[in-house]
Amino acid sequence: MDILDIEDIAQGMRGQAEHCLRNDAPVTASIILAQLALIDGPTACGQKITHWPRKPMEDAMPLRLTGGLHYLYLTDKEPRLGDIYEGRITDQDQIDKLVGQVVADHDAELLPWFDGPPQTNESGRSANFMAALLWLSGRVGSRFELLELGASAGVNTMMGRYHYDLNGVQAGPENSPMRIKPEWRGPPPPEAPVEIVSARGCDQNPIDLTDAETAARLKGYIWPEMPERFKRMEASIALAKQDPPDLTKADAADWVEEQLPLPQQSGVTRVLMHSIVWQYLPQTTKDRITTAMETAGKAATAEKPLAWISLETNRKTFSHELIIRYWPGGEEPALLGRAHAHGAWVEWFEG
């Protein structure tokens, strides 16, 4: 690999660190910047970074190793990292040195963390989905069947079991242990009834929240600056133990093509939804899903509507945009708002 390629990788990693800074995660940003010192170094992890075959930021490559390092700390395998996570070390050169030592000492254990994208399954994102359903309720009816792509552990597949306070607009069961109350910017969403009739999801590698080791790995991907995310994850785990989410191991396009032709209850809107998933899908998969949705949309009726809700990253602005399409009547994409990547705030555009 020539110097230009290495610099491209380094630039992508710096971009990922900048993204973390914009999302109030300076410690996570410093861990990513420390990985730059691993490039072209002797560790297997360093060589993995050096020879990364795709754009690092689009693959969230730096966040893969970041998750592994955080996991080592949370499981008491590497207490030295507490100096970084707890703020005792803030100098970047010192952080670089400590991260380099930890990677060298745990090289073989950390290497598999590069094998898949970060499983940042975040229940806070469901505030966006609920706001979109409130918006849809006045247009297509109040009853919904949810289909989630890239569901991971099904944290958002369980969104019907959460309570929401969206700028004073209440939704979901009042007695839920999961309380979703993001900082709200802009007008409140509409006050409307929402009934989630059913919810199921798919993922290439579904995660079982009820397994302690698996849950520990999932927590590794949580940015340490965000204690509220840990509280929400604990609530998700408790709810999954009561009643696990309905998850299927499947290719996203295959699953969508299988689900859309299934019988649909009259008076229930079928909703495809996903968050921070689209960037990881191959273009052929995206094209198949889009074709399947647009074809099904043409057959949708007032009695059996179809909707598509996405919270995905705009790759030009790196803002996370809440976009909706629905059939019949709203075939063109509508931008409802923007949101923090991990649920801290929602900026709502629609009244």
Image (tube, rainbow, N blue to C red):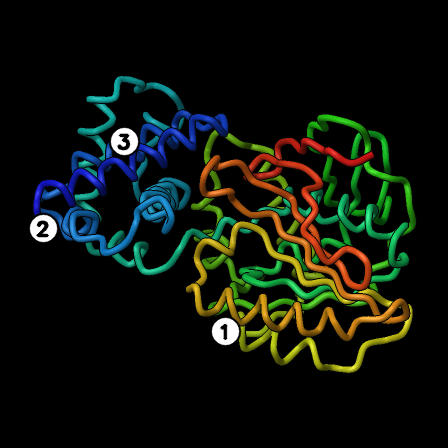
**Sequence order check, earlier mark of 3 and 2:** 2
Above or below: residue 141 compared with residue 81: below
Q: Position of residue 270 (x, y in %)?
A: 77, 67
Disc number placed over residue 178 in the picture, else none: none
The CA distance from mark 1 to mark 3 is 33 Å
Which element is circle 2 on?
loop
Task: Please tell me which residue lies in front, 210 or 37.
Answer: 37
| Amino acid found under the numbered disc labelled 3 | Leu
Instruction: Give the residue pinned by disc 1.
Output: 251
Determine whether, in the image, residue 198 is placed left or right of residue 58. Answer: right
| Amino acid found under the numbered disc labelled 2 | Met
| Amino acid found under the numbered disc labelled 1 | Asp
Q: Position of residue 7 (x, y in %)?
A: 17, 38
**Sequence order check, earlier mark of 2 and 1:** 2
Q: Nearer the viewer, mark 2 or mark 1?
A: 2
Disc number placed over residue 1 in the picture, else none: 2
Q: Position of residue 203 (x, y in %)?
A: 53, 67
Instruction: Give the residue pinned by disc 3.
Output: 33
**Sequence order check, earlier mark of 1 and 3:** 3
Total numbered labels placed on residues in the image: 3
Determine whether, in the image, residue 348 is placed left or right of residue 18. Answer: right
Which element is circle 1 on?
loop
Q: Residue at x 73, y 81 (%)?
A: 262
Q: Residue at x 68, y 66 (%)?
A: 147
Q: Residue at x 51, y 42 (%)?
A: 314
Above or below: residue 41 compared with residue 80: below
Q: Nearer the viewer, mark 1 or mark 3?
A: 1
Q: Position of residue 77 (x, y in %)?
A: 32, 45
